[in-house]
């Protein structure tokens, strides 16, 4: 996991999001790091007994954002070559930016969108997630403030877009990370991410087809860890309806 290896990196794509000292989210984040450090990814995704579901999801959302922040920051340090609009995506897929200020809820209704390149889409998503996790109406910082009823809908949007960053990285920046000896850490980070989205039904199977070969290998391990929750590519769709302006697939 990148936080365990590159957590001391001074330059990231954006400033890392820090949990409030002593908060539930900080406790959950430390628990996840400790569990991952022991090699137990399955234990790192399950909600600990008696703990708050929404706070657990919120803490992990911030941590996955920080993880992608480190990954993309390393790629930017290496250098990202210019890419034309419409290029730099997984084969058969193209992702679009909203032309208006992005919010999680806007992904579920028709909004104006524009073509962009893969690297531009990554920057768009990182800015979007940064804004969402710092929105105190969506991610309350006061224990007396309840999470909104639309919280999980918004979380699915955030995780869908973060999944797309992984897809772009694997298809177009894998070699750069390989040269740094960072591929094993990328794979561990992605496996953790996939186990998490499967545990909480956060990203649709149609979206996951962008990395179907890698996911096929992970699915076998997931089935062994969770024999009562075996998934198939044609299994339940998990991410909710996505506006046609957000993504297109040739599949």
Image: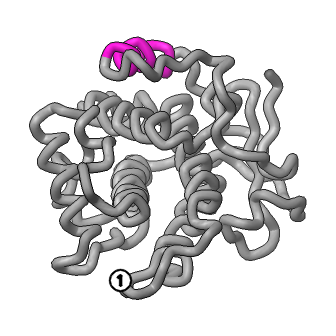
Count neighbours of disc 1 (C-alpha within 10 A) and say few if under 14, some if 14 to 19, many if 20 or more.
Answer: few
Query: In the rendered image, which quarter is residue 69 located in?
Result: bottom left
- Give me the residue at 45% from left, 49% from top: 79
* The quadrant where residue 144 appears: bottom left
Q: Is residue 243 above or below residue 201?
A: below
Q: Is residue 81 magenta?
A: no
Pick the residue in front: 102 or 201. 201
Colour approach in the figure: one colour
Numbered-mark total? 1
Image coords of residue 6 (percent x, y): 21, 51
Q: Is residue 60 visible?
A: yes
Assign the N terminus to one quadrant of the image.
Answer: top left
Quick check: 109 left or right of 221? right
Helix, strand or loop at label 1? It is loop
Q: Quadrant of the C terminus?
A: top right
Depth check: give the residue in front, 49 or 128.
49
Q: Residue, x 85% and y 60% (percent of image)?
A: 109
Q: Residue at x 35, y 59 (%)?
A: 56
Main SS, magenta residues: helix
Front residue of 130/80: it is 130
Q: Position of residue 200 (x, y in %)?
A: 48, 43
User: Does residue 69 appear in the picture of this structure?
Assistant: no
Q: Position of residue 71 (x, y in %)?
A: 37, 48
Q: Residue furthest front?
A: 50
Residue at numbered disc 1: 143
Instruction: Tell me where the magenta segment starts and ends, as one range.
Output: 215-224
User: How far across and down, in percent of the image, does residue 2 sit?
Assistant: 26, 46
């Amino acid at each position: 996991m990148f936080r365990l290896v590159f957590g001391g990196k001074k330059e990231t794509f954006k400033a890392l999001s820090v949990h409030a000292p002593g908060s539930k989210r900080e406790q959950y984040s430390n628990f996840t790091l400790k569990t991952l450090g022991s090699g137990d990814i399955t234990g790192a995704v399950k909600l600990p007994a008696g703990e708050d579901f929404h706070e657990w999801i919120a803490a992990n959302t911030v941590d996955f954002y920080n993880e992608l922040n480190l990954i993309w920051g390393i790629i930017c340090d290496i250098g990202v070559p210019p890419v034309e609009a419409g290029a730099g995506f997984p084969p058969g897929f193209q992702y679009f930016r909203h032309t208006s200020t992005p919010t999680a809820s806007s992904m579920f209704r028709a909004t104006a969108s524009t073509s962009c390149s893969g690297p531009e889409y990554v920057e768009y998503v990182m800015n979007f997630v940064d804004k969402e996790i710092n929105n105190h109406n969506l991610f309350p910082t006061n224990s007396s403030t309840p999470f909104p009823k639309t919280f999980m809908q918004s979380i699915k949007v955030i995780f869908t877009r973060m999944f797309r960053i992984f897809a772009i990285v694997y298809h177009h920046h894998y070699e750069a990370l390989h040269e740094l000896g960072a591929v094993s850490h990328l794979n561990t980070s992605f496996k953790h991410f996939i186990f998490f989205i499967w545990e909480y039904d956060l990203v649709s199977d149609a979206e996951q087809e962008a990395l179907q070969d890698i996911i096929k290998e992970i699915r076998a391990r997931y089935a062994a860890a969770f024999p009562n929750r075996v998934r198939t590519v044609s299994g339940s769709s998990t991410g909710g309806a996505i506006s046609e302006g957000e993504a297109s697939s040739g599949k």
